[in-house]
Image: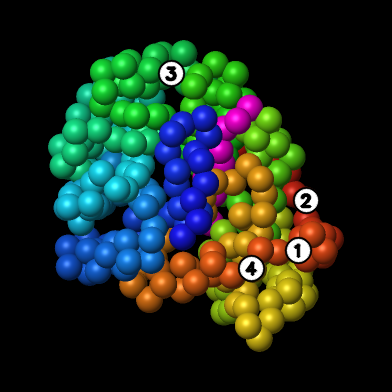
Amino acid sequence: MQKRKLGNSNLAVTVLGLGCMSIGTEEKAARNIIEAALEEGINYFDTADLYDMGRNEELVGKALKDVREHVIIATKVGNRWKPDQTGWTWDPSKAYIKEAVKNSLKRLGTDYIDLYQLHGGTIADPIEETIEAFEELKEEGFIRYYGISSIRPNVIREYVKKSNIVSVMMQYSMLDRRPEEEALSLVYEHGISAVTRGPLAKGLLSDKLLEKANEKGYLDYTYEELQEILPVLKETASASRSFTEVALAFNLANPAVASVVAGASSPEQVRQNARAVRSRPLTEEEIAVIKRITKANIYKDHR
């Protein structure tokens, strides 16, 4: 599988990453999904300490133990489970990050994390303190690189300006083009990679189309608008190419994007996604058609 360099790091990530949040909590089933990803040549695995209260990290670590030197493990920090485990609070403090990384390392069964990401963030955070924590973890050898997972343009701008992040994870799809103007162009100009999630827009950009829609619509698309544009978008697919292939190819057509992280709840879903990223790239004409049909929406919230 094709690889792309992650920002200014020396990490080469496959253009398809496995989003591990959806692998479940049963070890055998989770292992089967991860092994399918490895068989397809995927080297980039994304988890978080938040997922299943750390169980996800444990399963990912166990499944990748024998191939640790050949894979890139990314995890996240910042969401702190309450003592009674009824929910979590946001904590981007230096003290918490430096405590949490040790727990993640233990659960993953590894001595280092390839990419440690802040799992969110607001403009009101103590950003300099957060950056200091990541920089110290790099110096101490606990992490190789760090990034953020955020869709907030103002937050992304601060980290681009003040830190040494190598990546920003953000939601991006044909139906969610909000990152294009403010975020994707910004990170690209500064040699930082985007890692995208949600490429299928909750299944709307798969062959199931409106089966996944509800009356509320999606972002700033009404249900009626989705009824109108989804069949037209699907026409960019063909007998030899699925709508999923077009959706993933749209993300990878943006020069800022290093990898698309897609979840999978079965080995077959991993294989389908792997087939999709191996399909031919979109032509400039196809991209222009997609952009003409869809909205160049912008961030109204999440500031």
Along the viewing direction, whichever of 144 and 48 lies nearer the viewer: 144
Mark carried by residue 280: 4
Q: Amino acid under label 3?
A: Ile
Quadrant of the snapshot with the C terminus: top right
The answer to whether residue 199 is left or right of residue 19 is right
Identify which residue is drawn at 25% across, 44% down: 69
Q: Which label lies toward us, 2 or 1?
A: 1
The answer to whether residue 126 is left or right of residue 191 is left
Residue 188 visible in the picture: yes
- The x, y position of residue 95, in whole percent, is 28, 17
The answer to whether residue 166 is left or right of residue 242 is left
Q: CA distance from mark 2 to mark 1?
A: 19 Å
Identify which residue is drawn at 71% across, 44% down: 180
Mark carried by residue 296: 2
Q: How many marks?
A: 4
Nearer-N-terminus badge (4/3): 3
Nearer-N-terminus badge (2/1): 1
- The x, y position of residue 1, in whole percent, is 46, 60
Identify which residue is drawn at 53% across, 34% down: 7
Magenta residue check for 294: no
Q: Amino acid under label 1?
A: Thr
Q: Which residue is mark 1?
A: 283
Label 2: state its secondary structure: loop
Q: Which label lies toward us, 1 or 3?
A: 1
Nearer-N-terminus badge (2/4): 4
Q: Which residue is mark 3?
A: 131
Q: CA distance from mark 2 to mark 3?
A: 32 Å
Q: Is residue 210 above or below residue 254?
A: below
